[in-house]
Image (tube, rainbow, N blue to C red):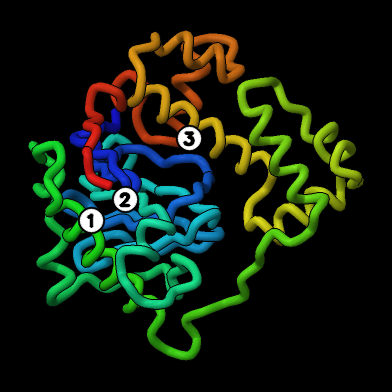
């Protein structure tokens, strides 16, 4: 079974050290995403359906709201992976230069030289709460990957943004109803869109399907409550619309690597803003 070796939360987002042994489901999230191989057999990350190698000297960058999933070629064999979830607003304010968005140019990152020295999995193990060094380390690591990914004329592809007022209304409805059973057809009608137009417009402007977006919202809410309260796991799952703790656990494992109870045990709240 996959394991959460260490989990660190802070103003930067999240840093996780995972021992991965299974393939995940396609998902997305609002943070920028970096994955680094630490030890074990090489694997791959599918970004927009394309396999990107994750192994010695090979890392993977994923943009906010870009569909992706981890693939384990040999199920049951663990690969230790350092995983970063970087908040775009934190990155933009931290680097002190004009960047409109945390948007990587390429998914494949070469880990060598100074970048290799920065990829240190021990940085998240037994980290003292409030240690400001974690901020500096994450900012430098992310900036190296960001700059490398954008080198070359072919690095950047088309970038969509949400500008249709009907779609903004639909997104707000999903945000408001994340803890309720949601019928996406009803959301489409409430926003004044037909079902086919709603799905097409959502995929084009947001970058993911409405289903993946809703799953991401539920994961965010689940993580916030797991790490910010002492509520029972079963209660959190029921409040998020799952019929049982088992159903909630299956969802959390598929989208977040480990069971919710294991994630909670491994999480540390870093008092770093």
Sequence-wise first label, 3 or 2: 2
Per the image, label 2 sits on a secondary structure element best described as: loop
Total number of numbered discs in the rendering? 3
Q: Position of residue 35 (x, y in %)?
A: 31, 55
* Left or right of 172, for residue 94: left
Q: Position of residue 197 (x, y in %)?
A: 86, 52
Q: Nearer the viewer, residue 217 or 52?
A: 217
Give residue 220's mark.
Answer: 3
Task: Estimate the spatial distance between the alpha carbons at disc 1 and disc 2, rounded to whole Å.
Answer: 21 Å
Location of residue 39 with respect to 247 vertically, above or below? below
Of discs 3 and 2, which sits in the foreground? 2
Return the residue at label 2: 12
Sequence-wise first label, 1 or 3: 1
Task: Estimate the spatial distance between the alpha carbons at disc 1 and disc 3, rounded to whole Å.
Answer: 25 Å
Q: Residue at x 66, y 67 (%)?
A: 160
Residues at circles 1 and 2 in contact by the CB criterion of under 8 Å: no
Location of the N terminus (image quadrant): top left
Q: Quadrant location of residue 18?
A: top left
Give residue 19's mark.
Answer: none
Residues at circles 1 and 3 in contact by the CB criterion of under 8 Å: no
Per the image, label 3 sits on a secondary structure element best described as: helix
Q: Position of residue 88 (x, y in %)?
A: 43, 58
Q: Is residue 19 visible?
A: no
Of discs 1 and 3, which sits in the foreground? 3
Q: Quadrant location of residue 133?
A: bottom left
Return the residue at label 1: 37
């Amino acid at each position: 079974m996959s394991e959460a070796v260490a989990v660190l939360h802070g103003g930067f987002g999240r840093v996780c050290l995972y021992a991965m042994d299974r393939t995940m489901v396609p998902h997305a999230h609002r943070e920028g995403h970096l994955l680094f191989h630490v030890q074990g057999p090489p694997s791959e990350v599918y970004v927009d359906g394309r396999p990107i190698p994750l192994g010695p000297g090979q890392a993977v960058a994923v943009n906010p709201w870009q569909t992706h999933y981890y693939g384990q070629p040999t199920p049951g064999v663990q690969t230790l992976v350092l995983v970063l979830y970087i908040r775009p607003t934190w990155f933009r304010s931290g680097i002190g230069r004009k960047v409109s968005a945390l948007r990587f140019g390429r998914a494949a990152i070469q880990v060598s030289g100074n970048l290799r020295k920065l990829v240190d999995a021990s940085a998240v193990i037994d980290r003292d709460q409030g240690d400001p060094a974690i901020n500096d380390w994450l900012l430098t690591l992310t900036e190296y990957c960001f700059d490398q990914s954008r080198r070359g004329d072919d690095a950047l592809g088309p970038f969509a943004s949400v500008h249709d007022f009907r779609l903004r209304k639909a997104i707000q409805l999903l945000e408001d109803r994340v803890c309720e059973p949601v019928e996406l057809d009803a959301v489409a009608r409430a926003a004044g869109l037909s079902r086919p137009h709603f799905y097409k417009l959502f995929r084009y402007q947001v970058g993911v399907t409405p289903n993946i977006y809703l799953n991401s919202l539920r994961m965010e809410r689940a993580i916030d409550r797991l790490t910010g309260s002492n509520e029972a796991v079963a209660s959190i799952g029921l409040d998020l619309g799952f019929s049982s703790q088992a159903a909630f656990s299956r969802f959390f494992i598929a989208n977040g690597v480990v069971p919710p109870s294991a994630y909670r045990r491994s999480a540390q709240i870093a008092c770093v803003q």
